Image (tube, helix red, strand yellow):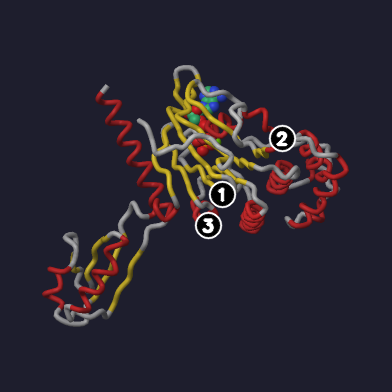
Amino acid sequence: MRHGPIHLGSEEVAVWADQITKSFGAAQAVRGVSLSIPKGMIYGVLGPNGAGKTTTLRMILGIIDPDSGSRQLLGHSRPRDVANRCGYLPEERGLYPTMKAREAIAFMGALRGLGWAEGRTRAGEMMEAAGLGHAVDKKIRHLSKGMAQLVQLLGSIVHKPDLIVLDEPFSGLDPVNQEHLEALVRSEAARGATILFSTHVMSHAERLCERVAIIAGGLRRFEGTVAEARGILPIEAQYRPSARAADVAALLPEDARFDGQCWRFSLADEEAEPLLLALIQGGFGVSGLSLQRPGLHDAFVRIVQDAKQTDAQEAAAC
Ligand SMILES: Nc1ncnc2c1ncn2[C@@H]1O[C@H](COP(=O)(O)OP(=O)(O)OP(=O)(O)O)[C@@H](O)[C@H]1O
Ligand SMILES: [Mg+2]
């Protein structure tokens, strides 16, 4: 299955992948994923466990090579050529336990070409800004898991990369540190960096991402804005007319049911305003109205369920 219009990698596109695939033995982890992420965008890769997110990110960064398909990173077809312009927080965390936090960040920067003194200075500033000023000289093994994760994250961006790839960066962080991280992502984007991150937590994607891709079973099942994702599900409406309640059914959608108190029905976003207008013009009035818009979480669950069903049908047909 081929997905979406993809334009060829260019200076304006930070990440470009066309139908990349990867198998481990007989198992197809990624069956054909395409992505085109403009420079400066905050982009989310969402998907259930085992969907192929980490494998996709690793292929994009050149940590592993795809079996087929092509990709470009910052306009280069060999990702390793631009390794120093990228920052990566891998899924499996790990820093040298005996290093002090500030040195650990400077060390990660040095691996990507940043001078040691500059790295140490920046590390101190970044830790201060992230609320970790008190821990600059603490050894990694004396930090909590969440603090160590933030230190590793700071180490992955200390060299001011053009592209930042974060695999499940929010997992294991408390709500305050999640907020710190969201602020950090926004400030890195404001500096001009492109941010690509994977997450299971829809609220972060909803707040941060300009566009998202939803991957399930190794295939991209959705690509678009958060609003477009939410738009795949109808709005759930509850409506109580102020007059002539019995006649109103003719104006309401087919699935409308009266529960003794109010009418319940579903409708698409663009249908809400014309319907309200028709109800008022029809003299039914509004004594109660609630429109419940689905969240990204609901859209995600639906897309993943549909994907499972499609895959099961395809498997049964083989
Ligand atoms: N190195 C590997 N060797 C064998 N199988 C692998 C390897 N890496 C990933 N897989 C398999 O590929 C599939 C996709 O894994 P991947 O880690 O990309 O998923 P994911 O979307 O990142 O999941 P999660 O949300 O749990 O992190 C899984 O079935 C996994 O078991
Ligand atoms: Mg993963």
* Figure disc tally: 3
Residue with the mark numbered 3: 207
* Nearer to the camera, 94 or 186: 186
Identify the amino acid type marked 1. Ile
Disc 3/disc 2 C-alpha distance (Å): 29 Å
Would you place residue 272 above or below residue 19 in this image?
below
Name which residue lies at 44% across and 42% down. 214
Q: Residue tagged by mark 2?
A: 84
In this view of the protein, which residue sits in the foreground, 280 or 6?
Answer: 6
Identify the residue under disc 1. Answer: 42
Coordinates of residue 248 in the picture (x, y in percent):
15, 73
Q: Is residue 24 left or right of residue 282?
A: right
Mark 3 Cα within 10 Å, few/some/many (few <14, many 20+)?
few
Question: Visible in this render: residue 174?
Answer: no
Q: Amino acid at mark 2?
A: Asn
Q: Is the N terminus in the top left, top right, bottom left or bottom right quadrant?
A: top left
Q: Position of residue 25 (x, y in %)?
A: 49, 17
Q: At x 49% / y 55%, what residue is drawn?
A: 206
- Which amino acid does the dot numbered 3 rest on? Arg
